[in-house]
Image (tube, helix red, strand yellow):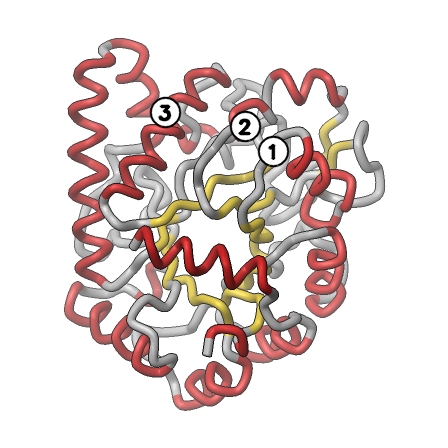
C-alpha cells in the first residue's frame, strides 16, 4: 500500500536490481526510484528493469524518474543522441522564431514522452528554470533556456504542459534558483549575496505559477534570507517557495550525497525534512548511505498521498 512507503527517492547501482537492493526496497519501500545512464543500457534492458521495480511494488504506476534534460545531461545516451537539444538550443529558437520553436519543441516533447513511456519511466526532471548568467558557474550554462526570466517562465510552462499531455510528469528545478551560483553545488556550496527583492524579480520569478506536481531544490545558500542554511535545509527559503513563489505541490530535495552539504547523510536527511521538503533524493546507489536515508525518512503523509494520486491521474 502506498501509505506504507517512506518519503525518499533513491538510485540503484546497475542495470538490474541486485538481491541486496531487492531486500532493501522491500524493507524500506521508497516513494520512488531514479535512474541514470549506469542503469540504462538498451530499451529492452530498461523495460525489464522498470517492470521488475513495478512488480516488486505491485504498482504499475510506481514513480520512476530520470534526469533527461537533453544536451550534456542525457541519461539515455547509450541508445539515443540527444546532445543537440539542450535548453539553450530551444531558448535560442524561441527568441528567433516562435512558430518554429513551437513546432520543434512540441515534436521533441512528444517523441521523448513516447520513449519514456516505452521504457516504463513516468517522471522527467525537467524543466530547468535556472537563469543563465555569463559570470556564473557553467554547471547551469546551456542547461538554462535563457538569461531572461520571462522567457524561461514561458518555455517552462510549455514544457510542463507538453509532458503532462503526453503522460509524463515533470520536476521544476532548482527551486528557488541556481543561476547565480559561482561554484558547482555537486562539489561546493554556492553562496549568493543578492537581496531578496532582486531575487524575487529575477531568479525566483521563473518558478512562479508553475503547474508541475514536483519541484527540486537547489543546494544554494541565499545570504539575505538565511545565512546559515542552504535552500534545501532552510525553513525560511521553503516558506518563501510556499508563500511568495506560491508552489503548493511536492518539494523534493536535490541529491543528498552532493558534497555541498557539509553534514552526514543522516543529518542532511533530517535537516531537509525539518526545513519542509516533502521527499528527499539520494542518487549514487550506495546501499550503506541509502539505509541511513531510509531510516531517517518518515512515512509519506496525507499530502504526499494526495499529490501521488494526482500524479497517477496524469500518467
Choose the circle earlier in sequence order: 3 or 2: 3
Looking at this view, name the residue that lies furthest to the top: 96
Q: Quadrant of residue 165?
A: top left
**Image position of 279 (left or right of 103):** right
Q: Residues within 10 Å of mark 1 (few under 14, many from 20)?
A: some
Task: Left or right? Give the position of 301 relative to 154.
Answer: right
- As helix, strand or loop, the secondary structure at mark 1 comes to loop
User: Which of the 4 image quadrants contains residue 57?
Assistant: bottom left
The answer to whether mark 2 and mark 1 are in CB contact below 8 A is: yes
- Circle nearer the N terminus (3, 1): 3
Residue on which disc 3 sits: 155
- How far apart are the two marked residues, 3 and 2, measured between alpha carbons? 13 Å
Measuring 54% from the left and 50% from the top, which residue is drawn there? Answer: 250
Q: Which mark is residue 146?
A: none
Give how far across and how far down residue 28 sits, in percent.
55, 81
Q: Residues within 10 Å of mark 2 (few under 14, many from 20)?
A: some
Dot 2: element: loop
> Which element type, helix, strand or loop, lies under badge 3?
helix
The answer to whether marks 3 and 1 mark residues whose Cβ atoms lie closer than 8 Å is: no
Could you classify mark 3 by the number of other residues whose Cα lies within 10 Å: few (under 14), some (14-19), or many (20 or more)?
Answer: many
Report the residue marked by disc 2. Answer: 208
Residue that badge 1 annotates: 246
Instruction: Determine the CA span between mark 3 and mark 1.
Output: 19 Å
At x 40%, y 90%, the residue is 19
Closer to the camera, 204 or 300? 300
Q: Nearer the viewer, mark 3 or mark 1?
A: 1
Q: Nearer the viewer, mark 3 or mark 2?
A: 2
> Residue 101 appears at what percent x and percent y?
22, 20
Mark 2 or mark 1, earlier in chain: 2
State the count of labels. 3
Amino acid at each position: 500500500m502506498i501509505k506504507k512507503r517512506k518519503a525518499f527517492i533513491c538510485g540503484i547501482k546497475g542495470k538490474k536490481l541486485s538481491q541486496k537492493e531487492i531486500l532493501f526496497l522491500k524493507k524500506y519501500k521508497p516513494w520512488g526510484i531514479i535512474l541514470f545512464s549506469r542503469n540504462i543500457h538498451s530499451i529492452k534492458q530498461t523495460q525489464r528493469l522498470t517492470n521488475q521495480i513495478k512488480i516488486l511494488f505491485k504498482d504499475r504506476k510506481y514513480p520512476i524518474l530520470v534526469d533527461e534534460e537533453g544536451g550534456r545531461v542525457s541519461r539515455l545516451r547509450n541508445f539515443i543522441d540527444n546532445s543537440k537539444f539542450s535548453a539553450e538550443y530551444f531558448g535560442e529558437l524561441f527568441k528567433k522564431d516562435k512558430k518554429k520553436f513551437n513546432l520543434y519543441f512540441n515534436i521533441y516533447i512528444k517523441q521523448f514522452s513516447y520513449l519514456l513511456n516505452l521504457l516504463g519511466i513516468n517522471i522527467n526532471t525537467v524543466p530547468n528554470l535556472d537563469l543563465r548568467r555569463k559570470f556564473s558557474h557553467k554547471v547551469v550554462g546551456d542547461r538554462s533556456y535563457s538569461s531572461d526570466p520571462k522567457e524561461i517562465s514561458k518555455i517552462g510552462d510549455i514544457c510542463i504542459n507538453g509532458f503532462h499531455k503526453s503522460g509524463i510528469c515533470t520536476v521544476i528545478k532548482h527551486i528557488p534558483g541556481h543561476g547565480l551560483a559561482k561554484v558547482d553545488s555537486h562539489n561546493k556550496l554556492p553562496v549568493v549575496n543578492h537581496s531578496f527583492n532582486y531575487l524575487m524579480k529575477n531568479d525566483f520569478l521563473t518558478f512562479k505559477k508553475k503547474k508541475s506536481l514536483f519541484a527540486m531544490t537547489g543546494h544554494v545558500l541565499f545570504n539575505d534570507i538565511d545565512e546559515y542554511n542552504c535552500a534545501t535545509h532552510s525553513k525560511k527559503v521553503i516558506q518563501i517557495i510556499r508563500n511568495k513563489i506560491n508552489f503548493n505541490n511536492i518539494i523534493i530535495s536535490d541529491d543528498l550525497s552532493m558534497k555541498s552539504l557539509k553534514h552526514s547523510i543522516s543529518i542532511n536527511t533530517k535537516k531537509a525534512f525539518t526545513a519542509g521538503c516533502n521527499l528527499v533524493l539520494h542518487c549514487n546507489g550506495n546501499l550503506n548511505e541509502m539505509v541511513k536515508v531510509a531510516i531517517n525518512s518518515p512515512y509519506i503523509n496525507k499530502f504526499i498521498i494526495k499529490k501521488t494520486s494526482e500524479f497517477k491521474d496524469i500518467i
